Image: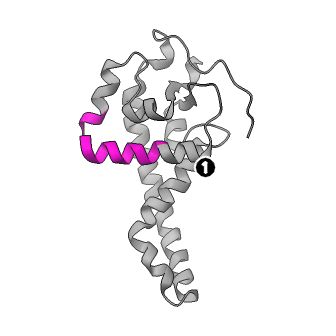
Amino acid sequence: MSLERDMSYAPNAGSPAYSGVLSRRVLAFLVDYLIIAILWVPAAVLLFFVGIATLGLAFFLYPVLYFIVAVFYFGFTMGGISQASLGMRSMGLRIVRTDGLRMDFLTAAVHLALFWLFNSVLTPLVLLVGLFTDRKRLLHDFLVGAVVVREEAM
C-alpha cells in the first residue's frame, strides 16, 4: 500500500465524472450481489468440509457466511488495484478517497458495513442523499471520505 497521495482524485462538482453515477451504482450493486451469490456456493461447500474437520464448530458460520463472502469480495476488489468491484468496473465506475490516498481493505469493509446499516434503516431513502449532493455522494461515502466517479471521465 502506498501512502503517496493522488491529487487527481476529485474532479470539480460539475464534471462529467459524476453524470449518471447514481443509476450506474444501482446496476453495479445488482451485478455485485449476483457475483457474491455465486461465490457463496463454493464458500458454503468449503465451510462444510471445514465444519467436519472442526467437529461441527465451523457450522456456526453458516448464518453469516453471505456477509463474510461480501466483506472479502468488496474488501479485495474495492480495496485492490482497480479501486472498483466487478460490478462497478462493468458500469465504468471506481471509488476514490477524498484525501487522495488509495482505498484499502479496511476502508472498503467499513464502507460496506455502513451501507448495510443505512440501507437497513433508510431503505430506499438511502439513495435520496445522492440526488442532493454536488458529487452524487451517498451518506456512507461521506463517512468514509470517498467519492464514486466514472472511469472514462477521469
Q: Position of residue 77 (x, y in %)?
A: 59, 46
Q: Position of residue 123 (x, y in %)?
A: 25, 42
Disc 1 residue crowd, few under 14, some 14–19, many 20+, Cα 10 Å: many
Front residue of this view, candidates 58 and 91: 58
Q: Kindly identify the residue that appears in the image at 41 percent across and 31 percent down.
A: 24
Tell me, yes or no, if residue 76 can be seen here: yes
Q: Secondary structure at mark 1?
A: helix
Task: Name the residue that disc number 1 marks.
Answer: 76
Front residue of this view, candidates 151 and 145: 145
Residue 3 as seen in the image, left or right of residue 24: right
Residue 122 as seen in the image, left or right of residue 43: left
Colour mapping: one colour
Quadrant of the snapshot with the N terminus: top right
Residue 42 as seen in the image, left or right of residue 22: right
Q: Position of residue 38 (x, y in %)?
A: 47, 60
Magenta stretch in the rendered image: 111-126
Quadrant of the snapshot with the C terminus: top right
Q: Kindly identify the residue that appears in the image at 46 percent across and 12 percent down.
A: 13
Residue 65 as seen in the image, left or right of residue 3: left
Tell me, yes or no, if residue 123 can be seen here: no
Q: Magenta segment: does it hold 34?
A: no
Q: Is residue 95 above or below residue 8?
A: below
Q: Kindly identify the residue that appears in the image at 52 percent across and 90 percent down.
A: 55
Q: Main secondary structure of the magenta part?
A: helix
Q: Magenta segment: does it hold 115?
A: yes
Front residue of this view, candidates 31 and 53: 53
Tell me how many marks there are: 1
In which quadrant of the rendered view does residue 140 lie?
Answer: top left
Q: Kindly identify the residue that appears in the image at 65 percent across and 43 percent down.
A: 80
Amino acid under disc 1: Phe
